[in-house]
Image (tube, rainbow, N blue to C red):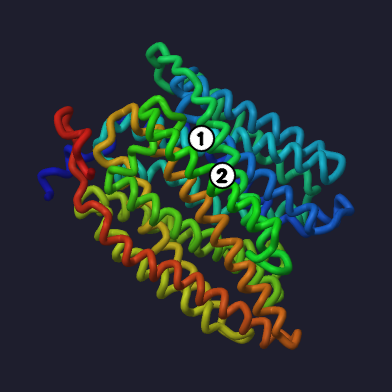
Amino acid sequence: MNASVPEERVDPQVLKVAMVLIVGGLAVVFDTTIVSVALHTLAAQLQTSVATIGWVSTGYLLALGVTIPLVGWAQGRFGGKRLWMFALLVFLAGSIAASLAWNAPSLIACRVIQGIGGGLMLPLMSTLVMQAAGGKALGRTMSVVSLPALLGPIFGPVLGGVILNSLNWRWLFWVNIPFCVVGFLLAWKLLPAEQQPSRPRLDAVGFILLSPGIFGILYGLSNASGTGGFAREDVLAPMLMGAALLVAFAIHATRLGERALVDVRLFAHRAVASASALLFLSGAALYGAMLLLPLYFQDIRGADALGAGLLLAPQGIGALLSRSLAGRLTDTVGAKWVTLAGFPIVATATIPFALATANTSEWALTAALVLRGFGLGAVTIPLMTAAFIGLDRPEVPHASIITRIAQQVGGSFGVALLAVILDGALAHTTGNISSSATAFDQAFWWATGFTGLAMLLCLALPGRLRIPTSETATTQAR
């Protein structure tokens, strides 16, 4: 094993590409986590209801989901470097416009523009770095690429709390601008020149089926937190229509093969199929709990926005601590064994919140958050890595899109389900802190359940990574 380590070091050129992309990627990650703690303030400042201002997040996520399927085609048509720089400019324009918004509808529209830019950037970031890596040291490479996702939960809520306590809410969007500008300049100067793009034709039928399908599911899930939960017409109808469109797209894409907007034949790879299913569940566990945790600290522990952000930071610190170890172990022992160790850590560290009362020690909960973050880092990196095992270069963009959609839909599902569970439990409380804490306990038990199911699916992941050769690259992990 030791003899193979030098061959699996991350190439300096790959590191340069990754660091350039990370600067721009931080804008998207920080923007998402900063805004998540600001909705109540934005509702008050813009004199609108919390339900209306919720579309600041919902509109962003819907635009993100609709745009993601276009990335593979757009990269082939315009080239990865040009597409990355264009996406940065779109996100920059949306951020500037959002900072100048004069009411809730204008802010929501600007967030949609940001979502379009973010929807291009998130899968493209993984694609460009994985293609540069050429199948070597994938775990360690992914541990570098995942840095924005790990830093966001640490600094985003804290930065959002500082801005809301000390500055005007418009600074929530002005902070994106330095990342966008510096990221654009670095990409222009340092990203390698590309060969002439292949200019593929857009699979228009596929786009008409896939993007509205994703939109329908995400929109339905976003409505589930209201009265009636998943039984409401505005939840069931869009979700069923979205699911039907996704089935139609799968049939269409299977017939079209590599010319489809997203090549669904990649699900024949055991690694892609199992990693996508687990990313759905890990997205539900991560984003679902990220709904519960700030509410718990604010409603049960009495924290303000800044206090909740500071209390959530230990989870990001834990994820940061496991990043390098998870990448190294993924390359040496394999994604299966790293995730089999990581998911039990996540479950164990969530249980203290399911048992917590209004008087539980904050130090104990802080320690649990560090441990939970450590487990999430140990899970996310091998799952993102496993999806690229044995893929040829043209297949990488499709794998990036598939895994990003799985995370996005999984996260929305987790948020919707836990919101319904929490609302239902709160409806049966007496209104005091103790009974409300019991309602949160029920929701946290469900979050723990997501990780328990994921443990079983981990067995389907591939073992130790192997550097693909030209003869074996298309047959590995099928």
Viewer-side residue, 25 vs 250: 250
The crowding category of the residue bearing disc 2, from other C-alpha atoms within 10 Å (few below 14, some 14 to 19, many at least 20), is many
Q: Secondary structure at mark 2?
A: helix
Q: Position of residue 101 (x, y in %)?
A: 82, 39
Q: Position of residue 16 (x, y in %)?
A: 39, 30
Query: Which residue is denoted by mark 1 in the rendering?
Result: 69
Q: Position of residue 261 (x, y in %)?
A: 46, 30
Task: Name which residue lies at 66% across and 69% down.
Answer: 295
Viewer-side residue, 166 vs 374: 374
- The reply to whether dot 2 and dot 1 touch (C-beta < 8 Å) is yes
Query: Which residue is denoted by mark 2 in the rendering?
Result: 214
Q: Give, as a three-letter code, the residue at label 1.
A: Pro
Task: Identify whether 288 is placed above or below 143.
Answer: below
Task: Name which residue lies at 81% across and 39% down.
Answer: 106
Q: Position of residue 196 (x, y in %)?
A: 40, 11
Task: Name which residue lies at 52% across and 84% down.
Answer: 355
Q: Residue furthest right?
A: 47
Quarter of the image with the C terminus in it: top left
Q: Secondary structure at mark 1?
A: helix
Residue 195 is labelled as none
